[in-house]
Amino acid sequence: MTAFKIDHDSSNPLHSQVEDLLRKLIENPEYQNGKLLPNEVDMAKHLGISRNTVRQATNKLVYESLLIRKKGVGTKVAKNNISTKLNKWTSFTHEMDEKGVAFKVYSLKVGWVAADKRISELFGIPHKTKVLKLERIRGIHSGPIVYFISYFHPRVELTGKEDFSKPLYEMLEKEYHSVASISKEGISAILADHELSLKLNIKEGDPVLFRKRIVCDPGDRPIEYNLGYYRADSFTYTIDIERG
């Protein structure tokens, strides 16, 4: 743990610094493969802090389902669980790259559809206007974890021939000058129907995290309407809220 250090003179709380260290530590392949994390007593001694401070940070990651603690055994990384923070959003590709998670595209489908009432009202376009629809199933080596459906405003001028394996928002900005600046999201829990069960390789009735996202440009104009269906056993949304 030679690089495992904190700044005792920093204004950042000690438990928060330890949490950041643990997040980096668990991305290490040896811990991803099942090696137990250093015990709390050893970490506390190494960092020169109390065991309770280490426990507070560890508890946060256990709560986020990133770590599993077993009494008498130790603490290890939870398998096949990915966490993302609601106070920061980016493309799925960048998000997984930042976490060092190798992912793959299981399915990608692009086509033109007639805008229904919801999409036409959201985009402010005539009913049944043709809009580009992008469907992607993405996941890790063990299987799919998320099913995305995206609808794009005609203003973006996508052709449908783009390389959608690239980071989406980077491509929109560089090639179409459409800057994804604001994300308006709604999250709910649903049960998988037959179609979702097939796409995510789960059973009908299994829990699914459902996220609606409206992505807008700096002028607050919608450029994408995105629906995301996440396997609840493989994905966790977290948010830190500061008391006002």
Image (tube, helix red, strand yellow):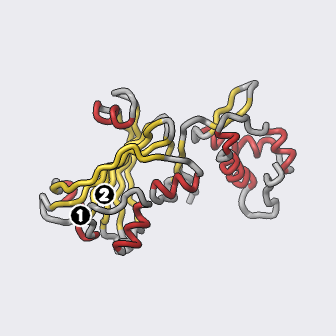
Residue occupying the point 81% across, 48% down: 1
Quarter of the image where one finds residue 127: bottom left
Instruction: Give the left or right position of residue 27, taking residue 145 as reference.
Output: right
Quarter of the image where one finds residue 118: bottom left
- Is residue 211 or residue 108 the one in the foreground? 108
x and y percentages locating residue 73 in the rendered image = 74, 26
**Label 2 element class:** strand
Q: Are marks 1 and 2 in contact (CB under 8 Å)?
A: yes
What kind of residue is marked 2?
Tyr
**Residue beneath label 2, please?**
225
Q: Residues within 10 Å of mark 2 (few under 14, many from 20)?
A: many
What kind of residue is marked 1?
Phe
Q: Earlier in the sequence, mark 1 or mark 2?
A: 1
Tag of residue 208? none
**Residue beneath label 1, please?**
123
Residue occupying the point 30% across, 32% down: 193
Residue occupying the point 65% across, 47% down: 27
**Label 1 element class:** helix
- Is residue 135 or residue 182 the one in the foreground? 135
Instruction: Give the left or right position of residue 83, taking residue 208 as reference.
Output: right
